[in-house]
Amino acid sequence: MKAPIIGLFVVAAVVLLANSFFVVNEAEQAIVTQFGEPVGTINEAGPHLKIPFIQNVNRFEKRIMKWDGDPNQIPTKDKRFIWIDTTARWRIVDPLLFFKTVATVNGAQSRLDDILDSAVRDAVSERLLVELVRGKDYVSQRGGDERFEVEGVVIEKEQLIGREEILAGLLEKAKTSVPEYGIELIDVQIKRINYVETVRQRVYERMINERKKVAAEYRSEGEGEQANILGQMERELKQIRSEAYRKALEVRGAADAQAAAIYANAFNQDKEFYSFLRTLEAYKKTIGENGKLVISTDAEFFKYLKAVK
């Protein structure tokens, strides 16, 4: 009988020892509770002792965790309805307070839903859409001063802030509400911004109209440039033709002068032969091929024909 009893004592001792030790790893922190009430906080990794069957260990993450909100439809200050999807990073910095207030990660996520959704809604509704989508160093490609009018109030470009400043203000506002849960909020970021469907269609139509307007401007500029090039080409062509005609007249005049000089020289050398040659040319031009000429035999024009026997 002694052997079974000793065996039972050994088993009981092993079970007690196994339930007396627990290990906390580097990524964890723990709260030891006794009958549901916290009696100790463990922040250091390694083996630790507890009272078996009486005390329990509640483990929490030391690492940074992520919160993802549900996309919300929120109107901006300039009455643009948008879908906005946000995310945040947080961690547990006071496990005892965390355990007393929210108890679990799911409970913390639920509290963050309320805090961050409210902060995001306030931040979006207080700012223009252009501020939510631009960075602080944005430079407009259109040039010039940008002006925005909201409910009759003109807002100058210098009064606008960037997305980074909006998120920084949102984070500071949300941070004031989370320490009471033993939580540290690290940052908040916008994952996606989009128009609601009805507004999106109008935006697409406006984008198409703007592209058409730009295309029309380019087309008009091209046609103007084409007319300018054609006009310049026409002027240059007229100038070339005028210059060529002038040179042709000069060449023709010089040739006529040279021919006249040759004729005059020939006339001075043998006047009778020159006269005879010119008369033959006159016959040729006057009568032509198969032509007839009726003149008096006493005419000066007939004298060389009369001399032929």
Image (cartoon, helix red, strand yellow):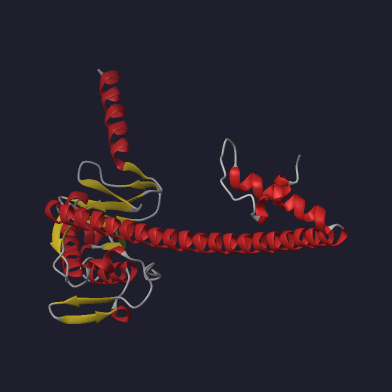
**Camera-side residue of 160 and 98:** 160
Left or right: residue 64 compared with residue 263: left
Left or right: residue 144 compared with residue 259: left
Residue 178 spot, x, y in % from top left: 22, 65
Identity of the residue drawn at 65% across and 47% down: 283
The number of numbered badges drawn on the structure is 0
Left or right: residue 45 compared with residue 57: right
Work out which quarter of the rendered image holds the N terminus and state it: top left
Q: Could you tell me if residue 210 is visible in this image?
A: yes
Quarter occupied by residue 185:
bottom left
**Camera-side residue of 148 and 102:** 148
Residue 75 spot, x, y in % from top left: 13, 64
**Where is 74 relative to 273, above or below?**
below
Work out which quarter of the rendered image holds the C terminus and state it: top right
**Where is 13 relative to 186, above or below?**
above
Q: Could you tell me if residue 31 is visible in this image?
A: no
Quarter occupied by residue 275:
bottom right
Identity of the residue drawn at 40% across and 70% down: 137
Identity of the residue drawn at 56% across and 46% down: 294
Residue 291 spot, x, y in % from top left: 56, 39
Identity of the residue drawn at 29% across and 76% down: 160
**Camera-side residue of 185 and 222:** 222
**Camera-side residue of 222 and 145:** 222
Residue 78 spot, x, y in % from top left: 16, 70
